[in-house]
Image (cartoon, helix red, strand yellow):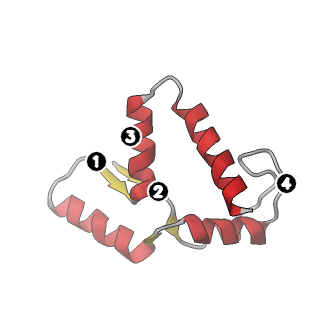
Amino acid sequence: CVHPGGIKTEIARRGRHYEDPLGGKTDTATAAANFEQAARTTAEDAANQIVRAVLKNQSRLLIGPDAVAIDVAARSFPGSYDRLLGQVLKVANRVKK
């Protein structure tokens, strides 16, 4: 089972965006630019990690530091990690501006 974080692909650039996770309106170009800054892992690196995991018969793979952080939060705070993540996104959004 592969749990990818932000992988640098065309997904954000090709998507349709009506509202960002914090409730504000955004356009595709802005969402793609924000995703490009946040995504830490290249598609090639993700593919290499998946191949290594398959060869090792690894049953679970977290790709990228953001996937690891979300996994730790979900396991540490199973009833409230989504609210915690929302707060982190709000702070990150304020810092970015």
Type of amino acid under label 1? Arg
Q: Which mark is residue 72?
A: 3
Type of amino acid under label 4? Lys
Q: Earlier in the sequence, mark 1 or mark 3?
A: 1
For the residues labelled 1 and 3, the Cα–Cα distance comes to: 14 Å
Q: Looking at the image, which residue is at 68% across and 72% down? A: 33
Residue found farthest to the front: 95
Q: Looking at the image, which residue is at 82% across and 54% down? A: 18
Q: Looking at the image, which residue is at 38% across and 40% down? A: 72
Tag in front: 1 or 3? 3
Tag in front: 1 or 4? 4
Type of amino acid under label 2? Gly
C-beta proximity under 8 Å, tags 1 and 3: no
Residue 34 location, x and y as percent?
67, 66
Q: Earlier in the sequence, mark 3 or mark 2?
A: 2
The residue nearer to you, when weighing 85 against 53, is 85
Tag in front: 3 or 4? 3
Residue 30 location, x and y as percent?
76, 68
Q: Earlier in the sequence, mark 2 or mark 1?
A: 2
